[in-house]
Image (cartoon, grey):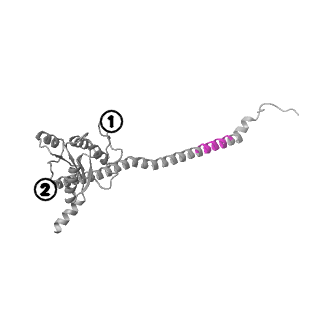
Amino acid sequence: MGMAAAAATESQQFHVLAVDDSLIDRKLIERLLRTSSYQVTTVDSGTKALEFLGLRENDDGTPNTPSISPNNHQEVEVNMVITDYCMPGMTGYDLLKKIKESSSLRNIPVVIMSSENVPSRISRCLEEGAEEFFLKPVRLSDLNRLKPHIMKRSKLKDQDQKQVIPEKIDTLLEVQKQHQPQEEAQPQVQPNLEQQQQQQSLQQNNNNNNNSSNKRKSMEQSLSPETTDRTRPRYSGIATVV
């Protein structure tokens, strides 16, 4: 009893989006999924399923990249899509292709249902990426095969998140390394400027000292006896008459 309750609690965490244009089949698959303790959202067309997943179509039928992250507008994450194959407008196969073509949704498991047992149809869906192909009417035993696919997808998502964190850390380290040399170079510029200023001041002092020395020498030369004698007129050899 305890194991059954634990399994029910674990399944209750998973959310399945069921797509079927038939009201009877849609109510049936919803009832089976809820009996298996899954959370269920039902829509009646592939277009509404894409809108619920956060994808919009262009006029040419190709899905747009989500303008917002998928499941932003819903309370719980979609862990699996189970869709009817034959639907008006967009078939289950078309819905499968659009989900697998989306980079943000391609990891969501997709299961196809059909009331027609057509081997080529089954093979085409499985080759396109469908996890299972159920024949209608879907039975409760069929839904027991869903959980391994959901668990596999959850593990892949956890691995992707674990890979993203180291990548973000590496990116931050690279950014820090790029800014670090610039920060280290700034302190080195200041001493160079100070040295230049000191050298300029020393050179000015030397020039001032040299100028003072030159002025002093010129003054000493002008006052020296030799210079005075040279500048006086000489009267040697001339007799003075009284």
Which residue is situated farthest in the top direction here? 238
* Residue numbers of the magenta segment: 206-218
- Indicate which disc, 2 or 1, sits on the residue closer to the N terminus: 1
Q: Along the horizontal axis of the image, is 28 left or right of 74?
A: left
Give the residue drawn at x 66%, y 42%.
215
On screen, residue 124 above or below 38:
above
Find residue 219 and report its horizontal and vertical position in percent: 69, 42
The amino acid type found where label 2 is placed reads Ser
In the rendered image, which quarter contains the N terminus? bottom left
Report the front residue among 215 and 139: 139
Q: Residue furthest right?
A: 242
Give the residue at x 30% y 53%: 165
Q: Kindly check if marks 2 and 1 are in contact, taking CB atoms under 8 A apart as contact.
A: no
Quarter location, residue 30: bottom left
Magenta region, main secondary structure = helix
Reading the image, the residue beneath label 2 is 141
**102, 37: nearer the viewer:** 37
In the image, 68 versus 114, the foreground residue is 114
Residue 173, given in percent of the width and then of the height, sits at 34, 50
Q: Residue at x 63, y 44 (%)?
A: 213
Label 2, residues with CA under 10 Å away: few <14, some 14-19, many ≥20? few
Q: Which residue sits furthest front?
A: 24
Q: What residue is disc 1 on?
A: 59
- The Cα atoms of the two marked residues, 2 and 1, are separated by 40 Å
Amino acid at circle 1: Asp
